[in-house]
Amino acid sequence: MMTTIGFIGLGTMGGPMAANLVKAGYEVQGFDLIDEARQKATDSGVHVASSATAAAEGASVLITMLPKGEHVRQALLGEDSPLSVLPPGSIVIDSSTIDVPTTRDLHERGGSLGLKILDAPVSGGLAGAEAGTLTFMIGGESETVDEVRELFTTMGSRIVQAGGPGSGQVAKAANQMVFGSSLVALSEAFTFAERLGLSPEKLFDVLSTSSGDCWALHNFCPLPGLVEGSAADHDYAPKFAASLLAKDLGLAATAADSAGVELVVGLGAKSKLDELSVNSGHLDSSAVITTVGVK
Ligand code: NAD
C-alpha cells in the first residue's frame, strides 16, 4: 500500500523535500500558513490541505519542517493537535532545527499517544533539499528509523543515527556551534592579519595548508576574492543567513546550559552573530567579519 505522508511547513526546505517525496511516488498531504508556499507545493504535486490536522488525516507518517521550537509547540503540542488524528503506531519526523527541551516534550507527548517520534534535523541547505542530498541527524528508536529509511534516502543521502530521543538536535546544535565559532575565528584572524600588513591572499594560502584549515574557510570564506563563488564575492547574498546561524548558536547555548557546560568560544561567536543579525540578519553568515575589529 502506498504510504500517505502529512507534511507541515512547506518553506525553503520543506517545499523541495515534499516535492522529492512526490517525485518518488508518495502521496503527500501538505500544509503551510503562507499562500506562496502552498501554491509552490501545489505546483510540485503536493495535495495542499486546509489545516495541519487535515494534512495529518489518513497519513501514517507526519513530517514537520518548521522554523523554531515555538512553531513546533504551536503546530504539534497545542490543543487540536494533528498528532491526535494519527493512528497509534504512526511515525512523526520533526526535521526542524529546534531546542532540546521542545524536542523532548514532543517525544513525550507522542509517546503518550502511542506514536513513534524521531527528531531528524538536517544539514545541506536549500541545494541539498532540492537535490535530495541532505544529511539527517536522527534521535529516536533505531527500529523506527528502519521503518522510514526509504523516506530519508529519498530526501537525503546520509543518515546519521545519533542516538536516543533528542540526540539529533544535540548533534545539530554541536555542529552549528563549531561552524559559527570557526567563522568568527576566521574573521578575527583575517582582520588582525590585514591590519598588521599580511595580505588576505597570503593568510588564505597559509591557513588552507596548515593546522588552521577548516570547512568554513573553503565554503564560507569571509573575504571576497579568495574562494570562487563565495557569498563574500556576491555582497554576502545568503547561502546560510546570519539570522539562522544566530538562532542555532542560541540553541547550542541553551543545550550547553542545560548540561551545565560553560561555553567560552561558542558564546563569543553567538554574540557576534547576534550583533550582525540586529540589522543584517538576511546577509550570509560570513558577513560576520563586518562586526569584527572594533576593540
Ligand atoms: P522557512 O521559514 O523558509 O520555512 C518554514 C515554513 O514553516 C514557513 O513557510 C512557515 O509559513 C511555515 N510555518 C510556520 N509555522 C507553521 C504552522 N504552525 N503550520 C504550518 N506551517 C507553518 O524555514 P526553512 O529555511 O525551511 O527552515 C526550516 C528549518 O530547517 C529551520 O529550523 C531551519 O533552521 C532548518 N534548516 C534550514 C536550512 C536552510 O538553509 N534554510 C538548512 C538546514 C536546516
Image (cartoon, rainbow, N blue to C red):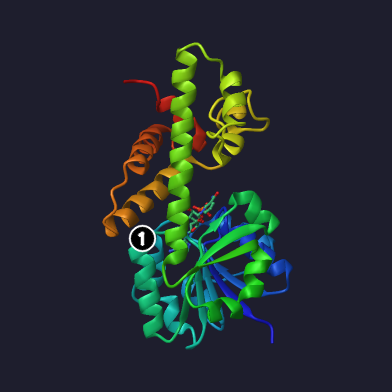
> At 61% across and 29% down in the image, what residue appears?
234
Q: How many marks?
A: 1
Measured as percent of width and height from the top left, residue 174 is found at 43, 53
Q: Amino acid at mark 1?
A: Glu
Quick one: label 1, few (<14), some, or many (20+) residues within 10 Å?
A: some
Tell me the quarter of the image containing the N terminus: bottom right
> At 39% across and 47% down in the image, what residue appears?
249
Q: Is residue 23 above or below residue 234?
A: below
Q: Quadrant of residue 205?
A: top right
Tell me the quarter of the image containing the C terminus: top left
Measured as percent of width and height from the top left, residue 63 is found at 53, 70
Tell whether 85 sits left or right of 209. left
**Residue under pointer 1:** 70
> At 56% across and 22% down in the image, what residue appears?
203
The reply to whether residue 60 is in sight is yes
Between residues 29 and 61, which one lies in front from this camera angle? 61
Measured as percent of width and height from the top left, residue 114 is found at 43, 87
